[in-house]
Image (cartoon, rainbow, N blue to C red):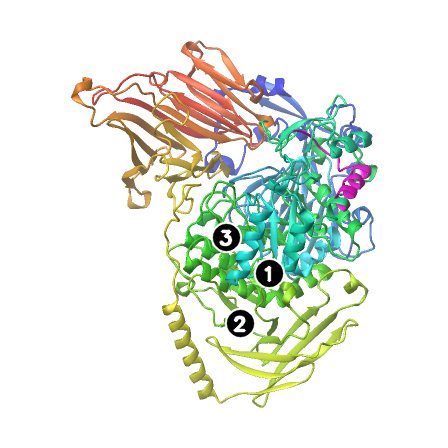
């Protein structure tokens, strides 16, 4: 295959990837394409299963279509098959399984997404036929499936993805990746959900699952068309169309299972930080929460607690007595969660390594020896969780670990992440000796995406083994569709900036739309320093997410709620008290999610799926009938928002805690939600506490709601040991009656007071008290009295907002970390969308090619991305100074979209940079840079120190094994430089002759970098972990006012057949 690609590769015949060319390829090019991804290549390893060979034989013998295509003047033959997929009804009414043929059905691997894999493979009796039938095309070993829907269909789901809520125009790849500092255009994050939820123009919905564990391309770039591309053969399962998106998610849960029932304490606030490096520090954090009256239930231990980062160990000095630490935490109402990674230190005498070696449970290399890769402890081996004996081995270790008082476990780095390798993970040729039920012996390419889920499963089962009367709580970074059966998740290593605050809402919602309702972001951002306003605003939104945890990186300023000044501390306190009051409602939502498969947090359009105006709303969401409307813009408080509410009655309310930095809450007419008292931790609650019902009547004067109650832990609820109460309210003859309509469960109703708050509008409410379980009547005041009450309440709200101490938008003093919360400058024109941060090196941190949906730069705000230096030394002057914006031209003002910056690099020198997207060549991004002498002293003869203009862009490798650098050198020789080459310095006639190209065979695009060879004296290729630098160096010499150093170059993305 590599030979075939290199033989057909001709730079002069490459096609520009402009908007028009990417929208549709010519038939000529479609008739031949190299295999898209490494896992699409024919597997020739000795472990290849008979099912794969049977699939290929059937493909060739029974439905092979030999086609001829002319490519670069040569005829090419490829085995291609295409057509309409065959189907059978499975699981339940309205669910269909599609395969390319009967033989492909037999050749498919076992399902790892279905909780009962037999249900995917068992036909049911049904008279229905599918409304939407996918088509397929098989080329080489690649199966491409397309499903077309009516114009106006909106797409959601695709699991853990960054960027916009509505996914039309996007493309992602399911390949679990350690994606520290990801951006809105990153195409592979920590989890894989080959699933799309389609919302039809009618408001009906349909779900599509590509049931494959392999790397899968989910392409939604063409309007109303879903396209999957992955290794053959795999089935596609459709769910619906059903009447609503909720109905689709319920049906999906019947396939992949529902979320585990979380212990009630896990719905409180969690405090975490990488650097709680001693038991004394942990106890100080816990004590401060209680002293300041800020609610919190859990303290987390990152890798700091371990002895040399060895899993299942404790540092003998800093965490000398973990049981005593946990006992102290428990006495103060805290739980303790501890991290466990999959990497086990390769060290004889370390009991975990010795035990694993004795039981032969390590992942192997192709030669049969254990694979060793570097992670935090150094050289590590990795359990093969595809084997039952390895899962049981791990579970027993977890069981023993729990005896130290561990309340929950955090599985991190389980993509699995590997250091010091360009792919950021283990070789795809590694061998898993999997159980037959999972797919048997396969290479890592097959099991990579489910490794994290299988680890989480093993951890979950170990916790159950330790105590059958407690519900496990596991948090996993990596996962697959179905992981919710075993673990919660979070959105990974995000950044402390406003973009990531805004994205966190959509990311949590997308996970919920993909079957994982228990998720949340690192509140405040993991990497970088939050400002007070950013942190407070994020806390206000974050407390409304299903999973609520603050977490931050070491070497940043402190990110506890009290770390940002009194104003921010008070907002955090108010926000967390809100959450704790709403826990009865949130816990009820989780019971429904666990038993029925309904979502916990859902997009606003769930309230009215027929309304197209709601489908792209990203700053509000639903918790059942409760709508949360938040501001994610630094200059706009919630009081300044103009909400776009669904049709019907939506009544605002608060807990006398309204604040410009807190979201606005609305309750849908026809709803009742239960709330409890403000608490410091969940353990403070008692069944006899006063119960409050917030009631919003609909246009018919009716409302209903539900409350689930049990012990908060254990499994008594599964045997009937609970109380599920359905409340109703109805207005008749100016009297609203609130009562219990029915109950479920064997629990007796606690004797407690019932407090009903009847919403009237404008935040006004009527209060009434009674005994829970008995009818309560509320006499409605006259209409003028109601209007007066609303007017009075609105004035009180306005006064409360005006008197609120707003969080100042200032930086926190401290030397650690960097402020990431400022707003970058956007350049958008033609094929490009850029983000530039003048305040840190004038760097370009985002370089999005819009037609292909590709984010080329690997960047965090304070380092990497596109940088320029003024010397040959790495990160010399120019990369971190604050730049001044000299000129900014906007395309919509009739100008060429451009930005001119300059930064003082010392010694009378400035580094100038002109970034532009030419109006006449919109597919090109041009950068003209120079080191210019401004104030060089006469004593130096008008010449500066020795300088070199070093252009240092760091590009991300979305598919590291399928990427190379191609160029023709000045001497005419052709070159392909692959990642295994390490670092390559090109000088003299070895330099590229004016252009070189970064080729991604998976994406079928290349990033061309053109430059003036007379200005560039050296070119450097440096392959990193999932990255590559393509550097341009000028000559090294002094400069004067008339002899600057300059490099002019440009980027363009072209399509590769």
Q: Report the residue marked by disc 2.
A: 648
Identify the residue at horizontal 58%, vertical 27% (top origin): 420
Q: Report the residue marked by disc 1.
A: 203
- Residue 537 vs 350, above or below: the answer is below
Q: Whole-percent x and y of residue 759?
A: 53, 77
- Residue 840 vs 680, above or below: the answer is above
Identify the residue at horizontal 58%, vertical 81% (top origin): 701
Q: Report the residue marked by disc 3.
A: 560
Residue 387 within the segment the image draws in magenta: yes
Q: Whole-percent x and y of residue 395?
A: 77, 43
Identify the residue at horizontal 18%, vertical 17% (top origin): 941
Helix, strand or loop at disc 2? loop
805 on left or right of 697: left
Sequence-wise first label, 1 or 2: 1
**Other-residue count near label 1 (Cα within 10 Å), few / some / many at <14 / 14–19 / ≥20:** many
Residue 230 in view (yes/no):
yes
74 on left or right of 394: left
Dividing the picture into quarters, in which one does residue 1004 lie?
A: top right
Closer to us: 111 or 1020? 1020
Q: Whole-percent x and y of residue 19?
A: 46, 38
Which residues fall within the magenta stretch?
A: 379-399
**Other-residue count near label 2 (Cα within 10 Å), few / some / many at <14 / 14–19 / ≥20:** few
Residue furthest left as drawn: 938
The quadrant the N terminus occupies is top right
Residue 50: numbered disc: none
Sequence-wise first label, 3 or 1: 1
Name the front one of labels 2 and 3. Answer: 3
- Residue 767 vs 989, above or below: the answer is below
Helix, strand or loop at disc 3? loop
759 on left or right of 518: left
Q: Whole-percent x and y of residue 11?
A: 49, 21
């Amino acid at each position: 295959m590599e030979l075939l690609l290199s033989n057909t590769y001709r730079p002069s015949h490459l096609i520009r990837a402009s908007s028009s060319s990417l929208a549709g390829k010519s038939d000529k090019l479609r008739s031949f394409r190299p295999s898209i991804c490494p896992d699409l290549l024919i597997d020739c390893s000795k472990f290849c299963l008979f099912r794969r060979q049977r699939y290929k034989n059937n493909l060739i013998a029974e439905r092979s279509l030999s086609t001829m295509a002319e490519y670069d003047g040569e005829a090419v033959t490829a085995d291609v098959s295409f057509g309409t997929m065959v189907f059978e009804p499975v699981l339940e009414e309205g669910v269909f399984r599609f395969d390319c043929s009967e033989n492909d059905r037999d050749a498919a691997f076992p399902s790892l997404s279905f909780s009962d894999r037999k249900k995917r493979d068992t036909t049911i009796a049904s008279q229905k036929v599918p409304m939407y039938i996918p088509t397929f095309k098989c080329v080489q070993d690649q199966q491409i499936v397309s499903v077309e829907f009516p114009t106006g269909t909106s797409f959601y789901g695709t699991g853990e993805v960054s960027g916009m809520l509505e996914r039309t125009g996007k493309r992602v790849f399911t390949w679990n990746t350690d994606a520290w500092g990801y951006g809105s255009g990153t195409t592979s994050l920590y989890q894989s959900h080959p699933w799309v939820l389609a919302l039809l123009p009618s408001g009906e919905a349909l779900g599509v699952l590509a049931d494959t564990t392999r790397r899968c391309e989910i392409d939604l770039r063409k309007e109303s068309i879903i396209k999957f591309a992955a290794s053959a053969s795999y089935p596609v399962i459709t769910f619906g169309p059903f009447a609503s998106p909720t109905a689709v998610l319920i049906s999906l849960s019947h396939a992949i299972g529902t979320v585990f029932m979380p212990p009630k304490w896990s719905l409180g606030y969690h405090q975490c930080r990488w650097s709680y490096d001693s038991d004394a520090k942990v106890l100080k954090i816990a004590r401060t929460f209680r002293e300041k009256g800020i609610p919190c239930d859990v303290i987390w231990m990152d890798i700091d607690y371990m002895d040399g980062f060895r899993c299942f160990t404790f540092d003998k000095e800093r965490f000398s007595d973990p049981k005593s630490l946990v006992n102290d935490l428990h006495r103060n109402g805290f739980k303790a969660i501890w991290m466990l990674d999959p990497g086990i230190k390769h060290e004889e005498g370390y009991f975990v390594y010795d035990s694993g070696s004795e039981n032969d449970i390590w992942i192997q290399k192709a030669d049969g020896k254990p694979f060793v890769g570097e992670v935090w402890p150094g050289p590590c081996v990795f359990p093969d969780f595809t084997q039952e004996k390895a899962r049981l081995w791990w579970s027993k270790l977890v069981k023993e670990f729990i005896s130290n008082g561990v309340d929950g476990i955090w599985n991190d780095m389980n993509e699995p992440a590997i250091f010091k390798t360009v792919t950021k993970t283990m070789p795809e040729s590694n061998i898993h000796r999997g159980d037959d039920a999972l797919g048997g012996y396969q290479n890592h390419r097959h099991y990579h995406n489910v490794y994290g889920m299988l680890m989480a499963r093993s951890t979950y089962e170990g916790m159950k083994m330790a105590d059958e009367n407690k519900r496990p709580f596991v948090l996993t970074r990596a996962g697959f569709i179905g992981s919710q059966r075993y673990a919660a998740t979070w959105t990974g290593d995000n950044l402390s900036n406003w973009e990531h605050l805004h994205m966190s809402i959509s990311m949590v919602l997308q996970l919920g739309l993909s079957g994982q309702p228990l998720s949340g972001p690192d509140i405040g951002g993991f990497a970088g320093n939050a400002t007070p306003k950013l942190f407070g605003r994020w806390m206000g939104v974050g407390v409304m997410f299903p999973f609520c945890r603050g977490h931050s990186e070491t070497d940043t300023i402190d990110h506890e709620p009290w770390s940002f000044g009194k104003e921010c501390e008070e907002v955090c306190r108010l926000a967390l008290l809100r959450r704790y009051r709403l826990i009865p409602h949130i816990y009820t939502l989780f019971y429904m999610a666990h038993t029925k498969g309904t979502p916990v947090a859902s997009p606003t359009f769930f309230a009215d799926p027929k309304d197209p105006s709601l489908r792209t709303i990203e700053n509000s969401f639903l918790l059942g009938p409760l709508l949360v409307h938040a501001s994610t813009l630094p200059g706009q408080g919630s009081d300044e928002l103009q909400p776009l509410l669904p049709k019907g009655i939506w009544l605002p309310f608060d807990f006398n805690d309204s604040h410009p930095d807190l979201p606005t809450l609305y309750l849908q007419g026809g709803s009742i939600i239960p709330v409890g008292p403000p608490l410091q931790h969940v353990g403070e609650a008692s069944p006899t506490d006063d119960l409050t019902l917030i009631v919003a009547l609909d246009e018919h004067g009716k409302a209903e709601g539900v409350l689930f109650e049990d012990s908060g832990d254990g499994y008594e609820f599964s045997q009937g040991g609970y109380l599920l109460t359905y409340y109703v309210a109805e207005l008749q003859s100016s009297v609203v009656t609130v009562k219990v309509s029915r109950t479920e469960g064997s629990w007796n109703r606690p004797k407690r007071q019932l407090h009903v708050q009847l919403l009237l509008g404008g935040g006004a409410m009527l209060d009434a008290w009674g005994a829970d379980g008995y009818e309560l009547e509320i006499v409605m005041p006259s209409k003028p009295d109601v209007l007066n009450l609303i007017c009075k309440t609105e004035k009180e709200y306005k006064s409360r907002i005006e008197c609120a101490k707003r969080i100042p938008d200032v930086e926190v003093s401290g030397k650690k970390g960097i402020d990431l919360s400022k707003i970058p400058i956007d350049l958008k024109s033609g094929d490009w969308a850029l983000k530039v941060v003048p305040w840190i090196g004038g760097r370009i941190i985002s370089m999005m090619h819009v037609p292909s949906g590709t984010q080329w730069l690997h960047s965090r705000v304070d380092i990497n991305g596109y940088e320029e230096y003024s010397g040959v030394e790495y990160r010399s002057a120019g990369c971190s100074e604050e730049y001044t914006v000299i000129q900014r031209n906007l395309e919509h003002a009739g100008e060429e979209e451009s930005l001119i910056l300059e930064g003082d690099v010392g010694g009378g020198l400035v580094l100038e940079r002109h970034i532009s997207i030419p109006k006449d060549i919109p597919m090109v991004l041009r950068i003209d840079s120079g080191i210019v002498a401004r104030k060089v002293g006469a004593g130096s003869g008008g010449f500066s120190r020795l300088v070199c203009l070093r252009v240092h862009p760091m590009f991300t490798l979305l598919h590291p094994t399928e990427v190379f650098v191609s160029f023709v050198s000045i001497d005419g020789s052709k070159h392909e430089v692959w990642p295994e080459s390490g670092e390559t310095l090109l000088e003299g006639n070895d330099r590229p002759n004016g252009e070189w190209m970064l080729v991604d065979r998976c994406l079928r695009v290349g990033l061309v970098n053109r430059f003036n060879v007379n200005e560039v004296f050296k070119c450097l290729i440096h392959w990193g972990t999932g990255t590559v630098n393509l550097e341009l160096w000028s000559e090294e010499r002094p400069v004067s006012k008339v002899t600057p150093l300059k490099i002019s170059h440009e980027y363009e993305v072209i399509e590769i057949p």
